[in-house]
Amino acid sequence: MAGEGEPKNNFGWANAQAAEFGPIGDVPGEGEEGEGEGEENDKKVSCEFITGIAGSGKTYKIRQRITEDPTEGILCATTGIAGVNLGATTIHAVLRYFDTDSLQQAFITGRLTRRLVELALLYRRIYLDEVSMLPAEQLDLFYQALLQANQYAKVKKKLPLGMGLTLTGDFCLALGTSVMMASGELKLVEDLVIGD
């Protein structure tokens, strides 16, 4: 575990612990010309959020981008039903996990980062539709692994700005979903009222 004063990420683990169990082989940034340049971009993932009411064309816009250039991205859904409706696969199948615990294990062992490196060599972005149905812990793990994947020399060579992430959805959440209020209080969706 982390010693006193060691930085921790938002999962409560020491950053060094995540690195200790990280992927082996392609050392991030190794052997690249101009190493150290663009360090500001090295610590970010290009993120985008597309939202609108149901039927406003969110998924249509993504499909249009991918049809024009298949290397633009891969469309993933957060649930099996959404996958069927979209004609896409789930993020679980693409990243090879089945719940938050298995995703956390994949992150710790480096499997998640290695999978994202594989995807970055094929696509510029991951499009994640119906994101309101994805647990926040999973999105955090996914984002952290994407940061790591974007540090690999072969990813930097193919995608100098790294692989991006586009989240799509509306603000409708399923009943039983907890929402963090600005005050820090958690409320169930069904308990929200206008003005909360």
Image (spheres, rainbow, N blue to C red):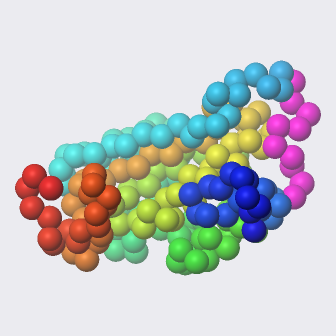
Furthest-front residue in view? 4
Above or below, 187 against 44 in this view is below
Q: Is residue 25 in the magenta section?
A: yes
Magenta-drawn stretch, dominant element (helix, strand or loop): loop
Residue 120 visible in the displayed image:
no
Q: In which quarter of the image is the C terminus?
A: bottom left
Asked whether residue 158 is in view, the answer is yes
Q: Does the magenta stretch include residue 158?
A: no
Q: Which residue is drawn at 24% across and 68% down?
A: 187
Q: In this view, does 91 lie above or below 150?
A: below
Q: Return the residue nearer the eye: 9 or 91.
A: 9
- Residue 185, image x and y in percent? 28, 63
Segment colored magenta: 24-33
Q: In which quarter of the image is the N terminus?
A: bottom right
Left or right, 143 with reference to 50: right
Q: Residue at x 83, y 21 (%)?
A: 34
